[in-house]
Amino acid sequence: MAVGELREIEPAVDPNLPDRLRLFVALEISTEAKAAMQQAQTELQRKLGRGCLRWTRPEQFHLTLKFLGDVDTSRVEALAETLRTACRGFGPITLRAETVGTFPNFRSPRVVWVGVSDRLGRLPLLQRAVENAADKLNAESQDDSFVGHVTLGRIKGINRREAENLKQLAIGMADRMFGEWVVTEVGLLRSELFPEGSRHTTLFRLALSGAS
């Protein structure tokens, strides 16, 4: 089956799946960029300690375009078809990962991230197309403040001194380049939550096969 065609997903063959699946739409990160991001995690861990952040496992690094929340399993194939149509007008996109920052700010950080963008400004257009398509079948509200990023870690608890230390470390990584790569498809992924962390499974891969 060619990339971009609808693939048979678990609900069609596994009657034991739950009635609702926790889904999101995302772009892959290159192996080289993941390795560079993991190195940044190691540096931050060494200087911040392991107690204040819950670090994202490198295999879970991705660029989320739209979090869909819980979706009826019976509607997943229709959702994938709608997303495939939305992606059809986009060709491959060259992404660039650079700089380290925090959400919502350095004073009260909750998320540590690496920024992801593209020089031609097509990433925000793709995100909006995916969001508009998903909203036709999903009740999640639109996010008007999209910032392309990969989450390095989430704050579990941090005091003022630790927050200032994190700020200085992030400023020191402001000019760091993590990699550049081409994405040729969008993934519709299932997220399952476990005590040891989340597990992601790709249900569909939707080709970016339009004009570049």
Image: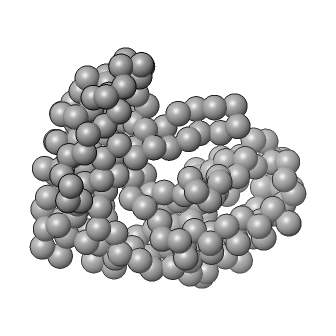
Residue 63, by quadrant, is bottom left
- Determine whether, in the image, residue 67 is placed left or right of residue 185: right
x, y (%) of residue 194? 63, 32
Question: Camera-side residue: 15 or 27?
Answer: 15
Front residue (pair 164, 29): 29
Residue 174 visible in rendering: no
Q: How is the image coloured?
A: one colour
Which residue sits at x=21%, y=55%?
A: 1
Image quarter for residue 147? bottom left
Residue at x 67% of width, y 67% of height: 38
Residue 32 in view in this figure: yes
What residue lies at 58% left-to-right and 32% top-to-bottom?
A: 193
Q: Residue 143: name its quadrant.
A: top left
Please state if 57 lies on the left or on the right of 136 as rendered.
right
Q: Position of residue 94 (x, y in %)?
A: 34, 76
* Front position in the image: 38 or 176: 38
